[in-house]
Image: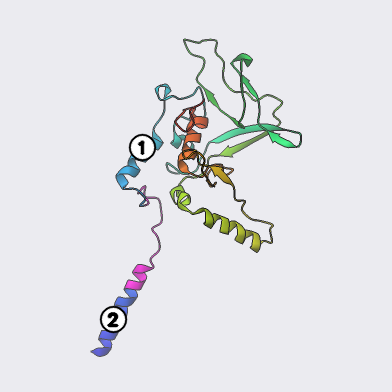
């Protein structure tokens, strides 16, 4: 009887240990990661999936009409099947952003490498308007970029700067400097005067998802906000 009790006790203990060490659930279930409740998460996703129109401030230059349009493979918020065009040229030994004339040369788009695919023109009120971007022959550097996967980025934002700095140091030590991350401090757009280690975007140009989203609304959909108020 005593031996049976001991065995039974070991089985219970092992069951508790296995339960405590069980693997995290796999697969995508569209549930909150725990940072917010599911109701808030579903409302946020509805905004992410929302199709924007003229009344929402869309355009006049844009690539997509919703966040999901560039992040939906295989589910909303994931990677992209859409490639965007970036161009530029070299002068004086460095890369320079393009100068792209629109509106019959009366306006020149500067200050960014992105070329928008779409434009709201012409229309009945302005039948002769022409603002579609076309790449001049002077822009000899051309490349395509796919939108990045956003799933799990809430956890990435929560990572402390010190953790990313330590990872860069460890990589440098393990590879004797051949391969290692480069730590970039970038402005937090919603907190003027403050910086943080960048972690979002192809060049880690943003440190928060709010900054990243404001940039995407402006450059990908042409929609201004309190963070990016200028067209």
Q: Earlier in the sequence, mark 1 or mark 2?
A: 2
Q: Which residues are magenta?
A: 16-33
Residue located farthest toward the bottom when viewing the structure as drawn: 2
* Residue at the (59%, 38%) spot, across then down: 145
* Residue at the (44%, 37%) spot, across then down: 68
Across and down, in percent, residue 25 comes to 38, 58
Across and down, in percent, residue 123 comes to 48, 13
- Asked whether residue 201 is drawn in magenta, I would say no
126 with respect to 112 (left or right)? left
Q: Residues within 10 Å of mark 1 (few under 14, many from 20)?
A: few
- Asked whether residue 28 is drawn in magenta, I would say yes
Number of callouts in the render?
Answer: 2
Across and down, in percent, residue 171 comes to 62, 59
Q: Secondary structure at mark 1?
A: helix
Between the residue at mark 1 and the residue at mark 2, the CA separation in whole angstroms equals: 50 Å
168 with respect to 218 (left or right)? right
- Residue 213 in view, yes or no: yes
Residue located farthest toward the front when viewing the structure as drawn: 193
Across and down, in percent, residue 227 comes to 47, 33
The chief SS type of the magenta part is: loop
Q: Nearer the viewer, residue 74 or 145?
A: 145
Q: Is residue 79 above or below residue 124?
A: below
Disc 1, disc 2: CB below 8 Å? Answer: no
- Residue 71 in view, yes or no: no
Q: Secondary structure at mark 2?
A: helix
Name the residue tied to disc 2. 9
122 with respect to 137 (left or right)? left
Q: Quadrant of the N terminus?
A: bottom left
Q: Nearer the viewer, residue 161 or 77?
A: 161
Name the residue tied to disc 1. 46
């Amino acid at each position: 009887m005593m031996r049976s009790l001991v065995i039974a006790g070991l089985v219970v203990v092992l069951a508790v240990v296995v339960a405590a060490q069980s693997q995290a659930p796999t697969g995508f279930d569209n549930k909150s990661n725990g940072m917010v409740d599911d109701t808030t998460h579903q409302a946020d996703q509805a905004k992410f999936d929302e199709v924007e129109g003229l009344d929402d401030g869309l355009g006049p230059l844009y690539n997509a009409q919703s966040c999901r349009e560039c992040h939906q493979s295989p589910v909303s918020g994931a990677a992209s099947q859409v490639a965007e065009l970036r161009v530029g040229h070299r002068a004086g030994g460095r890369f320079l952003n393009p100068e792209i004339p629109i509106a019959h040369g009366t306006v020149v788009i500067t200050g960014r490498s992105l070329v928008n695919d779409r434009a709201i023109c012409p229309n009945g009120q302005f039948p002769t308007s022409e603002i579609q971007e076309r790449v001049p022959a002077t822009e000899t550097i051309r490349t395509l970029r796919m939108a990045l996967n956003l799933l799990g980025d809430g956890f990435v934002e929560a990572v402390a700067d010190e953790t990313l700095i330590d990872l860069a140091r460890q990589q440098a030590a393990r590879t004797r400097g051949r391969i290692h991350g480069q730590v970039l401090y970038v402005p937090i757009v919603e907190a003027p005067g403050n910086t943080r280690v960048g972690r979002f975007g192809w060049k880690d140009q943003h440190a928060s998802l709010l900054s990243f989203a404001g940039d995407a609304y402006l450059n990908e959909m042409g929609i201004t906000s309190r963070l990016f108020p200028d067209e």
